[in-house]
Image (tube, rainbow, N blue to C red):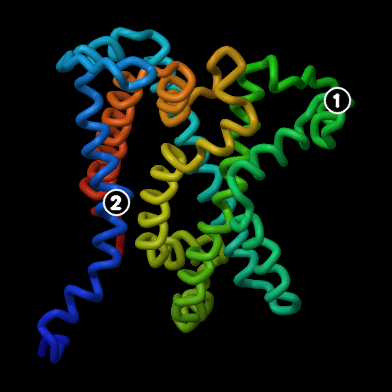
Amino acid sequence: MEKRTVFRSAWLPYALVAPQLAVTLVFFIWPAAQALYQSVFVEDAFGIHVEFVGLANFRALLADPYYAQSFATTALFALCVAALSLGSALLLAVLANRVVRGAAAYKTLIIWPYAVAPVVAGVLWLFLFDPSVGTLGLVLKKIGVDWNPLLNGAQAMSMVVLAAAWKQVSYNFVFFLAGLQAIPKSLLEAAAIDGAGPATRFWKIVFPLLSPTAFFLLVVNVIYAFFDTFGVIDAATQGGPSKATEVLVYKVFHDGFKGQDFGAAAAQSVILMAIVIALTVAQFRYLEKRVNY
């Protein structure tokens, strides 16, 4: 029998959801509508002269080779960040789930990086990989690697991928650990009695039961890589060198606030929003079929 909540006051349900609706309207719906509006106009840096141009901003973007390069850079960046952060978090969660002594301290230390701001994470990894004074940069120099992420695009991309993934590992770790602890131990004990080894138990029992958590984190991490890594890139490389780390969200900022081309920046934000929505829908459409609820 279905259970339903009954409110004594007719206005109470609306009052309870009103704060969330207000936040969604002010911080999501309104900016999205404003971006759609600005994307069909061209205006000067002071906003004095505004001219309607229709889809000209979108056509100019699609013809821009640097914008196509940002697409490829973003795809590579998002794929690497999601794979590295999810894989590392799952490994750490499995190890933490087996720890008996000092488990609380171990879990706390892993969760700490999530409290670090993206800008701080970018600066931290920039110092670590600095070719002159950075710990990791000096180690790479000593083993014969000509390391300088300020001049080498591939090295800069590797650095920001590590910084962004490190920032997100703690978030993924919490969910994976909660999912692992929710799996009945009787299932694993029964499989062990039947002769299943650790690897077999993980891939045949643990991972399928973790699939809802993994699917949720995959969606969250893709969105994170597309939007929330702006602070890391701005602090570490500012899109350089030679636009090697200029992902789509940073290009919106660069063209809009530095280049003062608000129409093109608004068009880019609309395209970026459409890409993320399409990727999310595709994940729910094709990957959710493999999830075991």
**What amino acid is labelled 1 in the image?**
Ser
Q: Quadrant of the C terminus?
A: bottom left
Helix, strand or loop at mark 2? helix
Would residue 168 appear left or right of 96 to someone viewing this image?
left
Q: Which mark is residue 132?
A: 1
| Residue 3 visible from this viewpoint | no
Q: Is residue 35 above or below residue 72?
A: below
Q: In this view, does 107 lie above or below 127?
A: below
**Separation of disc 2 and disc 1 at Cα?**
45 Å
Helix, strand or loop at mark 1? loop
**What amino acid is labelled 2 in the image?**
Val
Residue furthest to the right = 142
Q: Is residue 254 above or below residue 235?
A: above
> Which residue appears at 45% of the width and 76% of the height?
183
| Residue 153 visible from this viewpoint | yes
Would residue 239 appear left or right of 13 to someone viewing this image?
right
Task: Place residue 31 in its image quadrant.
Answer: top left
Tell me the residue that label 2 is attached to. 26
Near mark 1 (Cα within 10 A), the count class, few <14, some 14-19 or many ≥20, is few
> Which residue appears at 67% of the width and 68% of the height?
108
> Which residue appears at 79% of the width and 21% of the height?
145
Mark 2 vs mark 1, foreground winner is 2
Q: Locate residue 85, reporting x and y percent.
A: 54, 47
